[in-house]
Each structure stands twice: as C-alpha cells, then as structure tokens.
Image (cartoon, rainbow, N blue to C red):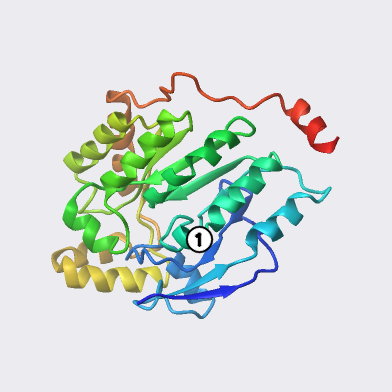
Amino acid sequence: MVAYREEPCRTALNKVKGMPFPWSLNPYTGCAHQCTFCYVRGFERRADRPSDDRYGTDIRVKINIAEVLRRELARRSWAREEVTIGAATDPYQPAEGRYRLTRACLIELSRALTPFSLITRGPMVWRDVDVLQDAAQRVELSVNVSVPTLDDRIWRTTEPGTAPPRQRLRALKTLVDAGVKANVGMAPILPGLSDKPELMADVVREAREAGACGIWANLLYLRPGTREHFLDCLARDWPELLPDYERLYARGAYLPRSEAEPTRNEVRSLAKAHDIRDRRPRPLHPQRRDEQLSLLSA
C-alpha cells in the first residue's frame, strides 16, 4: 500500500556534486517502483528515513514544483546548465499519471531554453512525446530508458513495482519515431545474474530493434542502506550468490575494476556489433541559441 503526501517544496533545482551533471530535479520524493538495488535507499538512510521494505510506501508529491521551477529559471543568474530529471526518484512512477508534475516541469525547462535529460523505468514517458518533441526543437535533450535485463525472473524479483522491460522499449520506439533522442541504460547490471553474455545480448539486440540512439551500462553499487536491503533480498531469492557478493563488495560500494571492466567491455562490443547509433531520419536540432535568447528577452 502506497501513501501519497501532497506537500509544497521551497526549491526545485538541486546543485549536484560528484556527478556528470550539474543540476537535478525530482518532482517526487520516494519511488513506488521499490527496486531492491536502488541507490537512493542509501540517501534515505543518511537522512534517517527508512531504506528497507518501507521505502517506496510513502511518496511526497511536490505539488508546486513547476511554479517554483519557473521562478528559479527566470533568475538572471541562471546559466541554463543541463538539468537531469529522475536522479533520485523515477519521474514517471505511477503518481505521474495523476499529478503530471514531470510534464509540467518539462514545459518550464523548454520555455526557459534549458537543456535536460530524463532517466526513467516508466513507459508512461511516451505520453509526453508532444512536449518532448517540441522541446527538442528548442534545447538539447535526451531520454534514458533503463532496461538492465529482459529476463522475467530477474526483472520481477528486483524491480517489483516497474512495468515490463519490453513496454519500456516500446515507449522508447515511440519517442525515437517522433524524433526525440532516446537511449537505453543497462543499469544496474547485477553480477552473477544479469551480467550473463546472452542476457546482455538480448537487451542490446532489442534496443537496436526499438531504435535506441545509444546504450550505456552501469554495474551495481552498494552503499550503506542499499547494501543491507539488497543482500537481504539476495539471501532470500538467490542464496547461492550471497558469498560471491560478500566477496565482490568486501572493500566498498563499487565492484573492483577487474570485475567491472569485462562487463562494460562486453556491452561496448555488443553495441558495436549491433551498430547502436542515432538513426533518426531527421534529428531535431535546436534553433540557434542566440536567436532564441533574443526572443526570450524581448
């Protein structure tokens, strides 16, 4: 049972450190997808909030986030740096079907000529193809659809609240067919489970068939909070793998490079073999930035 709390927020944009993007935006706090491996569980633990099975049962809905975002984007100091949506919650979890906060934020970012990227496991993203198509003519953007595996048991067990992976790929195809840049993120790949060559090949092959413009992969990392919950679930679902994980992650949250690189290299080789690249017939290019800015300030 998921409870939703409608609460206003004071800020919309979050300055990010140590990540490949400068700003993040999260219309919701908490995520009903309840993936066993979710790294946000680590953030929740540090904030003294539940990171166990209770995570994802209480969702904060930032009902005024689009209005707050509009004010922040209108500041003279705003440099129009890239904003990543969904770094700490899925912007297309079930609540978006009712509240449409992500859609409202996309409209504000587009109007303010601010580039952005999306990360989601929710096929509901296809519903906003009109907004994304329009935004793609104004700013650089990308949609990253997370599909770490197509294996039915691994998906159902580790991503209990998500839609089937092939539904996500169909949503991606809708976006690409509309001219929107959409990539597949194989994240996280789980050692001993979804890192099997044949399973990774299945994802890359179907990503190619869906028209993915690119593909990338991340390996599982286990911060405190995520670690305890994931290993408890592993002991329940795949107990034979528990000793391997305790060995692999004995020294920290990340896999040793010697263990991670072969998997990354395999994904790169598969992407090359299947010729994963941007195949949009008429990629949408933003208008000249100076022309847009002059219109915005007129």
Give left or right: position of 171 versus 289.
Answer: left
Comparing 30 with 97, the one in front is 97
Give the total of numbered labels. Answer: 1
Give left or right: position of 243 versus 124.
Answer: left
Disc 1: which residue: 88
Residue 174 screen position, x and y as percent:
39, 35
In which quadrant will I find the N terminus?
A: bottom left
Residue 172 screen position, x and y as percent:
38, 38
In which quadrant will I find the C terminus?
A: top right
**Point 18% across, 72% down: residue:** 236
Can residue 1 be seen from the camera position used here? yes
Residue 119 screen position, x and y as percent:
46, 49
Residue 231 screen position, x and y as percent:
28, 70
Can residue 213 be seen from the camera position used here? no
Tag 1: amino acid: Ala
Q: Is 279 situated above or below 37?
A: above
Give left or right: position of 205 versus 226.
Answer: left
**Point 77% across, 27% down: residue:** 290
Quadrant of residue 80 in the image?
A: top right
Q: Is 185 situated above or below 45?
A: above
Give left or right: position of 114 versus 272.
Answer: right
Q: Determine the residue located farthest toward the top in the rendered image.
A: 281
**Point 44% across, 46% down: residue:** 127
Comparing 256 with 75, the one in front is 75
**Point 65% across, 45% down: residue:** 109
Q: Residues within 10 Å of mark 1 (few under 14, many from 20)?
A: many
